[in-house]
Amino acid sequence: MNVTMASAPAVRTYGHFIDGETTSSSEQIVRRSPATGQPLATFARGTADDVDRAVKAARRAFDEGPWPRLSGLERGRVLLRLADLMGRDLDKLAMIEAAEVGKPIRQARADVENSIALTQYAASLSMSAHGEIYSNLGEHLTGMVIREPCGVVGMVTPWNFPLLQLVQKLPFALGAGCTAVCKPAEVASGTTVELAALCAEAGVPAGAFNVVTGAGSTAGQALTESSLIDMVSFTGSTGIGRSVIAAAQTNIKRVSLELGGKGATIVFADADLEDAVEAAIYANVFNSGECCVSGTRLLIDRRVADDFTAALGERLGDLRVGDPMDPETDIGPMIHDAHLAKVISMIDHALSEGGSIVAGGSRLSGAPYDAGSFVAPTVIDEVRVESQLFREEVFGPVLAVTRFDSQDEAIRLANAVDYGLANSVWTKNLDLAWTTARRLRSGTVWINTTIDGAPQLPGGGVKLSGVGREMGQAGFDEFTEHKTIQLRTGGWERSIAGRAEQDPAGAPGPEARPAS
Ligand code: NAD
């Protein structure tokens, strides 16, 4: 692992983006590179007043502005322009993302490409959205169930995929006709502010998308508590997700939560074991392990476990840890030193609970690692179901290996955690694959693939991993309300008895409705 770090780019200065304008703040947050410690960017430290201005702008844009009143076709065209502009600025967006998060530049580029695809798909949903008509309710009653934008959406996003996590929400919400305010993570806000400027350039009207940067405990809390927003769409940790639920009580707003995960890669003995080794590593080191759908547990058939873990250890040695800006880098630094300390403490704890190191296990030191927050990719064998490493999110490249003797045991182990975001199953036996997939309690199951996807496919969690879905038609529908409009023709029957019998064809009259 002989690497050097690229020299630092100029420090970028970001303000908020409120009502179509960039506004500064008296206080700034300085973001330093997690790879080199050099300053990269400053972000305005937003206050509750900044949030209030942004929310009022989004409210006005929703209640009085053109955006919700445009046709889906017109909104879709704006989103397609936005996708084109993201393509124009792909290099810049990827560079900012890699620098602030420390993610390898190859992955940062893929994040931007995926964001473009999601925006294009959201445009198509905007163009094709429609409601339903019920014309079989008897001669005199026609029912229409239409979809309307749910209003002003507060979006709170994490640092691990700042652009991609936002784009799993924003174009779907805008496509549905909503307006929004986003509070990005304080350590990686650059691409969110850049995206706001691109939205304006694409034709999203002033106030329809606003950004307030700053701390979660102030700006984030103020946004989620605001009674002027109709929905909060949050991606982040399960702990903060609980505070968001509490904050949403102010006006009983709609809540969608994408929270933590503890995914398993389940490898049966008949799998293509070479593919499975590569996949188990990828699932664990992708985005430096700072990924909610990481396969951070390996559940392995005992009959092949020794050879498999030995192959994992060998293969990890080929990976390059280092400069996020180097296209050859596989694994970047952890987001900051405090997080690195948490990862190291979880490794130490796993060893104290009986785990044994197969590879890695410590902070990387010496040049060029000393200036950054680097950990060696780690595999720990013999991790028991009761242990912390089996149950809690690490958010680093640390793989916990546990052996099983039967399909039932593999499924029981996979489901034995509080999270339910994504799992992956490896076998050549279709019956085994399918029956396992059906019994896993997670929002996504991959079969013979991992961390895969497409804009058409919804993602989200069960159990402590969250509520609601993003992407796909389901992700679009999250930002809409059903409205039922009933039209009765032929005159209003004035007698109560007559109203109950009004429709001999079988449609219940108003008296037949359940009392509320
Ligand atoms: P985090 O919960 O610490 O922060 C997420 C966001 O919430 C940040 O913008 C933060 O400033 C804000 N915040 C903090 N306190 C707040 C408060 N009281 N009120 C409102 N907002 C507040 O999460 P993180 O460390 O940025 O990201 C990592 C976590 O995100 C992991 O747990 C990971 O699993 C999860 N995640 C989940 C998904 C998913 O799709 N399920 C995707 C990515 C990340």
Image (tube, rainbow, N blue to C red):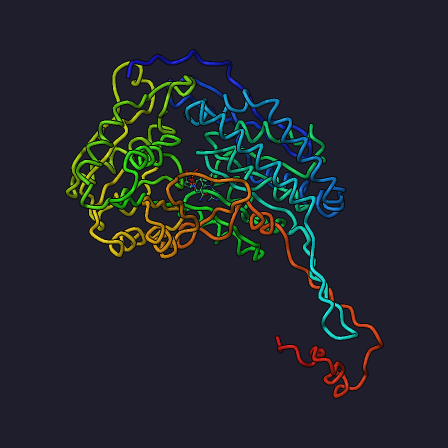
In the rendered structure, the answer to whether residue 138 lies left or right of residue 357 reads right
Q: Tell me if residue 399 can be seen.
A: yes
Q: Is residue 479 above or below residue 132?
A: above
- Specify the quadrant that holds the N terminus: top left
Q: Position of residue 431 (x, y in %)?
A: 35, 54
Work out which residue is located at the far bottom of the displayed protein and give it: 497
In the rendered structure, the answer to whether residue 216 lies left or right of residue 283 reads right
Q: How many marks on residues?
A: 0
Residue at 27% from the left image edge and 27% from the top image edge: 316
Who is closer to the viewer here, 117 or 37?
117
- Specify the quadrant that holds the C terminus: bottom right
The image quadrant that residue 145 belongs to is: bottom right
Q: Position of residue 182 (x, y in %)?
A: 57, 38
Residue at 29% from the left image edge and 32% from the top image edge: 341
Q: Position of residue 202 (x, y in %)?
A: 69, 30
The image quadrant that residue 349 belongs to is: top left
Work out which residue is located at the far right of the displayed protein and give it: 491
Residue at 33% from the left image edge and 28% from the top image edge: 337
In the rendered structure, the answer to whether residue 373 lies left or right of residue 11 reads left
Who is closer to the viewer here, 236 or 329?
329
Q: Is residue 389 above or below residue 317?
A: below
Residue at 33% from the left image edge and 25% from the top image edge: 373
The image quadrant that residue 222 belongs to is: top right
Who is closer to the viewer here, 431 or 315?
431
Q: Name the quarter showing ligand 1.
A: top left
Q: Is residue 154 above or below residue 347?
A: below
Q: Is residue 367 above or below residue 243?
A: above
Q: Tell me if residue 179 can be seen.
A: no
In the rendered structure, the answer to whether residue 377 lies left or right of residue 500 reads left
Q: Position of residue 264 (x, y in %)?
A: 32, 45
